[in-house]
Amino acid sequence: MGDRPLFLLRPIVSNITTLIDAAPPKKSLNNDKRKMSLMKITMENQLILKRLQKRESYYNVESWEVDYRKREKILKKMCEYPYIL
């Protein structure tokens, strides 16, 4: 490299970089399978989301109050001193 001046090497280097940039990108062999798998997962997620959105929420507050009263009675019986909350 010591014999050739730098201005003579520039075209060679630029030609090599052009060839490297022009090379076609590597294609994945299982690209189609991954896309199909992703589509299947997306469809399943959409179905689950629709089922969840159709379902009405159900809260039974009366049941909660009955359970609370039962626990409160049990705590009062267990405590040595008056139970204050």
Image (cartoon, helix red, strand yellow):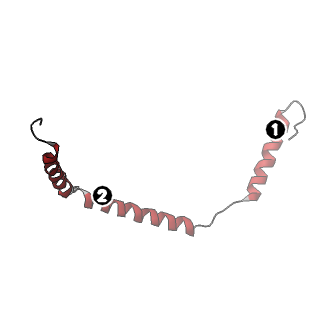
- Is residue 70 depicted above or below 30 in this figure? above
Residue depicted at 85% across the width and 38% down the height = 76
Residue depicted at 10% across the width and 40% down the height = 4
Residue 15 location, x and y as percent? Answer: 15, 53
- Is residue 42 depicted above or below 70 in this figure? below
Q: Residue furthest top?
A: 80
Q: In the image, what residue type sits under mark 2? A: Arg
Q: Secondary structure at mark 2?
A: helix
Crowding at mark 2 (Cα within 10 Å: few <14, some 14-19, many 20+) = few
Q: Secondary structure at mark 1?
A: helix
Residue 60 location, x and y as percent? Answer: 71, 59
Q: Earlier in the sequence, mark 1 or mark 2?
A: 2
Along the line of sight, the residue nearer the viewer: 57 or 18: 18
Q: In the image, what residue type sits under mark 1? A: Leu
Residue depicted at 13% across the width and 49% down the height = 12
- Is residue 65 depicted above or below 50 in this figure? above
Crowding at mark 1 (Cα within 10 Å: few <14, some 14-19, many 20+) = some
Residue 36 location, x and y as percent? Answer: 31, 62
Label 1, on which residue?
75
Q: Which mark is residue 7?
A: none
- Indicate the quadrant containing the N terminus: top left, top right, bottom left or bottom right: top left
Q: Which mark is residue 34?
A: 2
